[in-house]
Image (spheres, rainbow, N blue to C red):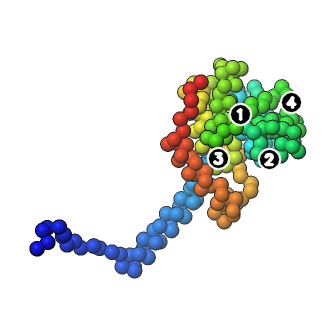
Amino acid sequence: MTWHLFRKRTLWLPTWRGWLLLCLAGLLGAWGLSRGVLAFLSVTERLPADLLVVEGWIADDALEDAAAEFRRGQFKVLVTTGGPLSKGFFLSGYATHASLAANTLFKLGLTTNQVIAVPGQYTARGRTLEAAVAFRDWLLAHEPGVRSINLVTVGPHARRSRLTYQRVLGKQVRVGVIAVPERHYDLEHWWRSSEGLKSVPVEALAYVWSALMLWPGKP
């Protein structure tokens, strides 16, 4: 007597042909995802805006693109953001990514009337979030009438940066975004380089985390 503690069921398992088909389907799905994820993350959507905001940690060639974007547009001012440098302070003399980027833009031909550095503080919760909070506080104090900005960043960081700034700034300020092309790996085959493998999957996961978990404080 089993006291009705057990019952018999039939379990279906794939044959070798079935496993082969499932593996092929998985590979095709992964291939399709790898082709589309970079395009999804590297979004560019410009808005009519008076302010161009540049994430100060981006590379010098990306800052060149930002300077060109400023010259092409009808922007009132360019604002650089970013917190403390993790290295290079003793050589450069600049304490934050915001100030380093601003002075790089001066070298590229922009003037002190055109560029304002808005540095953030060190934080363990994420440099983009802290930079956005510092920019929000500056905006409320100096340009409270601004209703839209364009944000310049690099490649796959764009969608997460826009999400972060939009949440921090709230509904009062619309955030456009400009993704400067990533030049340190092949965009068509990013998974073939260490830089691409370190950048794209991490940014994809970080975007999902930001979408689910980011709760900035109110002004």
Q: Nearer the viewer, residue 73 or 120?
A: 120
Q: Is residue 54 visible?
A: no
- In space, the residues marked 1 and 2 are separated at their CA atoms by 16 Å
- Disc 3 crowd rating (10 Å Cα; few below 14, some 14-19, many 20+) is many
User: Residue at position x 63%, y 37% from top?
Assistant: 129
Residue 157 got which mark?
Answer: 3
Circle 3 or circle 2, nearest the eye? 2
Tell me, yes or no, whether the two marked residues, 1 and 2, touch with CB atoms within 8 Å: no
Q: Give residue 11's quadrant in the image.
A: bottom left
Question: Which circle marks residue 111 in the picture?
Answer: 4
Q: Are marks 3 and 2 in contact (CB under 8 Å)?
A: no
Instruction: Compute the Cα span from label 4 to label 3.
Output: 27 Å
Total marks in image: 4
User: Residue 127 lies in what quarter of the image?
Assistant: top right
Residue designated by label 2: 87
Dot 3 or dot 2: first in sequence order is: 2
Between disc 3 and disc 1, whose residue precedes?
Answer: 1
Nearer the camera: disc 1 or disc 4:
1
Indicate the secondary structure of the residue bearing disc 2: loop
User: Tag 4, which secondary structure?
Assistant: loop
* Local secondary structure at mark 3: helix
Q: Quadrant of residue 100?
A: top right
Q: Report how far apart the C-alphas of labels 3 and 2 lie in the structure.
A: 21 Å
